[in-house]
Amino acid sequence: MAPDLHRRRMPCLAVAGATTLALLLAGCAGRGSAENEPVADTATRFLASVTSAPDQGCDLLAPATLEEVEADGEQCADVLPEAAGGEQSGEPTVDVYGRDAMVRWGEQVIFLARFDDGWRVTAAGCEPTGKDLPYDCEVEGP
């Protein structure tokens, strides 16, 4: 009787899959990794510029987000301070998922995406609406 190779390989594949998932997740959290630094820096510059130099904050928005902010005919620099302003204190928590990222300072949350020219803000002024529910964001793209 020939051995059932399919059954023997499955535990190895399951272990390999679990190991890969653990390594991926370990690389996602915290500001400490080199990959997370540009994300945290962009989010920090964005929040710092929202009230002091809104034009610079607008320059950090993703193109679709900027278009949505200005969809009603208002200038981004006029809308941004009221919509995306917020306090940041301490070190942010950065979660990177491939080309997308989330940065949190307590309840303040910013979402970013990686573009050819670097990280851009896709949503800001975001607050959680409940466990496993989408965030409610004051500034966001379509």
Image: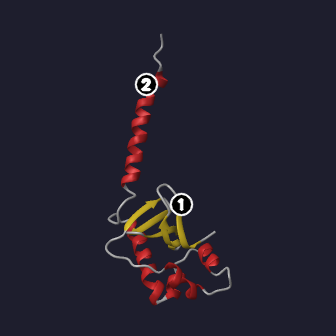
Query: Could you tell me residue 55's position as x and y percent?
Result: 53, 87
The residue at the point 47 percent across, 19 percent down is 4
Query: Could you tell me residue 97's position as x and y percent?
Result: 47, 58
The residue at the point 40 percent across, 75 percent down is 41
Q: How is the image coloured?
A: secondary structure
Name the kind of residue labelled 2 in the image: Arg
Side (left or right) of 38 relative to 84? left
Label 2, on which residue? 8
- Quarter of the picture holding the C terminus: bottom right
Numbered badge on residue 134:
1
Q: How many residues crowd mark 1 within 10 Å: few (<14), some (14–19), many (20+)?
A: few
Number of the front mark, 2 or 1: 1
The residue at the point 64 percent across, 76 percent down is 68
Query: Could you tell me residue 114's position as x and y percent?
Result: 51, 67
**Farthest residue, direction top:** 1
Q: Nearer the viewer, residue 136 or 42?
A: 136
Q: Nearer the viewer, residue 58 or 137?
A: 137
Numbered badge on residue 45:
none
Above or below residue 86? Residue 5 is above
Q: Secondary structure at mark 1?
A: loop
Side (left or right) of 44 relative to 139? left
Query: Could you tell me residue 28's position as x and y percent?
Result: 40, 58
Task: Tell me the quarter of the picture where residue 108 sits.
Answer: bottom left
Above or below residue 55? Residue 44 is above
Side (left or right) of 84 relative to 28? right
Q: Secondary structure at mark 2?
A: helix
Q: Does the rendering let one see residue 49?
A: yes
